[in-house]
Every structure is written in structure tokens, then in C-alpha cells.
Image (spheres, rainbow, N blue to C red):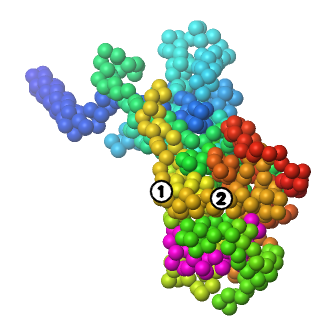
Amino acid sequence: MAQKIQFRRCLILALLLCLGFVGLGYRLVDLQVLRHEELAAKARWNHKLTSFREPRRGDILDAQGNPLATSVFVKTICADPSLVGGWQRKIAQTLAPLLQVPETELEQRLQPRLRREASGTVITNRYVVLKRKVSVETWQQIQQAMAELDFGFDIKQLPRAQRTFYYLLRRKAVFADSVGDQLRIYPNKSLAAHVLGYVGTEERDLGYTKLLDTVGRDGIELALNSKLRGVPGWRVTETDSRRREVVALRGQDVTPRDGLNVVLTLDSMLQHHLETALAEAMQKHEPISITGIVVRPRSGEILAMATLPNFDPNCPGAVSADARRNRIITDIMEPGSTFKIVVVSGALNDGVVRLQDQFDCENGRFAFAGRILHDHHPYGVIPVERIIAKSSNIGSAKIGIKLGEARLHEYIRAFGFGEKTGLPLLGEVSGYVPPVKNWYKVSIAQIPMGHGLTATRLQMVMAMAAIANGGVLMRPMLVNRLEDRQGNLVAQYAPQAVRRVVSEAAAREMIKALRAVTLPDGTAAQAALEYYDVAGKTGTAQKAGRGGYMPGKYFSSFIGFFPADNPELCISIVLDEPQHGYYGGQVAAPVFRQFAELAANHLNIRPDKTEEPTPSAQMAAHRP
């Protein structure tokens, strides 16, 4: 009997041992075969650290090297809710004033969240972002505040296991992500905002962390994003049980290549003067918008470009998309009388007319192709030079008729209308120039007046700059060069001539006519400067709508350059629906004069007037 009992016990023990070995074998198969990939990944996570190293985004500088956009590295503040225990409220109260985030929001983020993996294992979140783009100084304050966190009792009196918990809570519960982040800063706020553009972020999931890439959204930031952003680096290294790097086991260490600096042709002082002059005109005339462009005719360099309403690229979301639009390149308009330079210079170039040739302006009413064309004032027989000075629609129409449809269309296209200028900013439109086959009978008379086609403000100023440049159209130039972080030259951009549109002789004749515009009896007497001869043209174009031209709504403009015989600057001022006056000579010309005087002083442009202005000329130049 006793032997049977002992045998039964041995059998049971053997069965239990067999079951144990079977279970152990299954566990080994499960770990080594069935869950090999999952556990290998966890092992790599526990002992290998891969960190992304973001390059510093390049700066955007003006022509003198003054920063217009720059970047500083910042921290992403994170927390490990599994280490917080029940102290969410205490930590939230400590961090809220430093992070400038509501306590309730921080407390909610610090709550542990349980989730079940595909294998069935229940885990808690150990990574939560509290705030991004925090300065290094603020992170240092957070570290000190967490180290001094008061729990209301002496931690040294606690058992060792509890002391370890509170040590980890103070030192490890809140941390800065090892992945570098940076903040884009525009130190001059709204200055040149429509040229610079702004940046945004794109989230990239790296598995062990999420990275926010800084990317350009508009302006130079977008157009040259690939040059500015640089090339990322990375580091792959081994860690110990506390996730500390073992430097000796560092496998890969690739240094990031910082982005290139972009040096613009803009002069920040001229940009400031231009925006100030536009702001004063905006307040005085209350237009929908006002724009200004300053170009160096001989090179095509843009020294200033401004659009109001403006915005601060440090916080672009604070304004509507309409305010962020660069109207100089995105909006089209009928150019109006400023377009007369195209037909007259073309006719002079072909020898069809001379400045002294006389045209009958029909005392302000001219019947052509079933339409009646009008002048703002009745003129009789006047020479071509006076047609420009007085901005006669009828005189310009007759010159266009004499030039002919085919040649007029060729000159329009040669001056760059109907195609993009090639400015390195996205969003530029080409405007519309109808082909000759689509012209109406009256088009040959209306187009010389600036009606029946559309153009951008940039196209118009570049056409005027071509006249100032002796008849050579230049490509607008906004980027001067690219440099690395040490200031070494990487790429230098040179001025580019597009084509010769008229001869140098024809350009000189055109300049002579344009100088008459700013004389006391011209349409832009208020654009005259005391020490410089100014050549230019006014424009007062009635706005077109769905039902035709809209009464009382105008684009008012003046485009001029100085010194007239050796032009240094070509300046365009355009107001959209100004109030309290709408003629270009009344509202745009004074803005030109205000800015041009400051620009001449800043650039130390040599005066070209040899005689003192007469009292009548001074009164005309400064009349209200």
C-alpha cells in the first residue's frame, strides 16, 4: 500500500516536471520565435538611442547684412506621466506660470493613459508634450523649479524605495526632448513681411519621437526653402539601463549641415522709409490697399517692396489671408495712363512719330469705331511731348492707330506684359494681353490708354525702368547672393538683361517727354524734387467690374525715376480706391516725393539740378 502511494507521488511529480519543461519550452519558443521581432525591437529601444539633429535654418539678410529673419534653438518640454504619481496638480501649478499654459490643461496632459498593445500587454504613456518652442532660459527655470518642488514633507525621512520615486519625479518626470527644435524670429516685425513670408511646421514621426520640421510657407521663406533649411544630421549610440549614452559605443554621428544665409537686394532703411510713407498715405486717403516698389533701373535690383495692409510674420495667423497677399505680384489691374509709355516709346522707336509732331486732340471728344473717347480736359492740337505731359487719351489713341495693331502688340509683349517677370517669389501672375486676332475695332485706340489688358504692379515698374535704363528691360532681382554660416560666398547672382525693347535714342526722347510730366503744368507737379530732375507718368484707371467700369472706383498711380538723365531709382506708388481725391498726380505723386527725398539722402545721390528752382516751381511742387 505504501509503495503504491509513493509510486503515485513520483508519477505526479514527474508529470508536473514534464509540464513545467513543456511550459518552459513553449515560453522559449514564444520568446525566441513567435515574438522575436517585437522583443528585438524593445531590446534595441532599451539599449540604442537614435536622435535626429536638426540643422539651423539660414538667416535672411538685407543688402548691408542686417538680419531680417533668423533662428534660435529652443526646447520641447515633455513629461513622463508614469513618474508623476498623484502629483499632477502640484506639478501643473509649478509649471503653468513658466510655460504660460493653463493649470487645468497641464494637469490633464499629466494624467497617465493606459493602452493595450497588439500583444495584449497593457502599458501607460511615458511621453507627452507640454509645450514646444520654449527658450533655453525658461527650460533652466523649469529644471530649478522641479528640483525645489515642495511636497510638504521631508523626503529624507521616507524609506529608500519611496525616496527613489520622489527623486525620479523631481529629476525625470519633466524633461526636454533631445530632438533639437528652433524658433523663427523676424526682429523687425512687419518690415518687408510680404517679401520675407513666414514659416510653419510639419510633423514627422520618427518612431521614438515626433519631429516638427520648420518649412517656408510664403515669400522668400518658401521660394528658397531648400537653401534655407539645410541638411539634417543624426546620432546612433548605445545606452545603459538608465537610458544614458555610452559615448564609447557611439556608432554613427553625422553632423547636420546648417542652411545657407540668403542675402537680399533690399535695403532695410529704404524699406522702412517706404512703409512709413505708405502708412501715412493709407491714413490720409483710406484706400483698400497701397503698394510701393523701388527698383535700380540699370540692374533690376529691388531695393524696397511694400504692401499695406501689412502683417507680422512672427504671428501670421493673427491676420486674414487677404492681408498676407503680396498684391504687387498677385493682383492684376488695367494700368491706365502709365501704359502710354509703351505706345509712345514704340512709335518713337519705329520713327512713326517725333516729339514735336502735332496731333489734334479734338477738344476732348473723339469718335472712333462707334465709341466716343474722352480726355479729362479739352486739348486742341498739341505735340507728342505735351500728349505725355498732359496725359491725353485721345492723343495716345491716335499714336496707337498710327503705329498699328501688329507693332503695338509686339511692343507690349517686348516690354514684358503677358508673362511673368521671373521674380523669385511664388504666386506671381502674368496678367492678360489679348492676341491681335481677339481685338475689337476700338482696341487699337483703347489699349494705348491702358484699357483692355491687365498687368501687375511689378510689370509696370519694370517697363518704366526699361525706359530709364536706355531701352533695356531687366529681370527683377531680389536675391543678391547665398552665404554659409561663416559668411563664405556660396553663390552670387548677377543682373540679367531680358531684351532691348527700344533704342537708346528712343529711350532718351521718351525720358524728355516724361520729364515734362513733373513740370508745374504737368499732371505730376507734386512729384517734383528740389535738387533732382524727375521723369515719370501718372495713372488714374477706373476699375473694371462684371457690369463694366465702376463709377467712383479707381487705381491711382505714379511711376517715376530720378535723376532723369542718369537714373538711380525707379519708384512706383499705387493706391486702390483712394478716398479724398483719386487722380494719380494728387494722391500718388506726393507719396513718391516724400519717399524719394529720404531715399536720395540715404543713398547720397548726387543732385543733377544746376539752377535753383523758381518760386512758381516750388509752389507747384508742394501745393496740396
Q: Are marks 1 and 2 in contact (CB under 8 Å)?
A: no
Above or below for 1 versus 214:
above
Magenta stretch contains residue 396: yes
User: What residue do we see at 51% from left, 38% from top?
Assistant: 262
State the image coordinates of residue 39 (x, y, percent, origin top left): 28, 33
Please state if 525 lies on the left or on the right of 33 as rendered. right
Above or below for 146 versus 590:
above
Q: Which residue is mark 2?
A: 511
Residue 479 or residue 356, whichever sits in front: 356
Above or below for 504 versus 67:
below
State the image coordinates of residue 64 (x, y, percent, origin top left): 59, 33
Q: Which residues are magenta?
A: 389-413
Q: Which residue is mark 1?
A: 498
Q: Which mark is residue 68?
A: none
Q: Nearer the viewer, mark 1 or mark 2?
A: 2
Residue 606 or residue 291, whichever sits in front: 606
Residue 486 or residue 420, whichever sits in front: 420
Label 1, label 2: how far apart the Cα atoms are: 20 Å
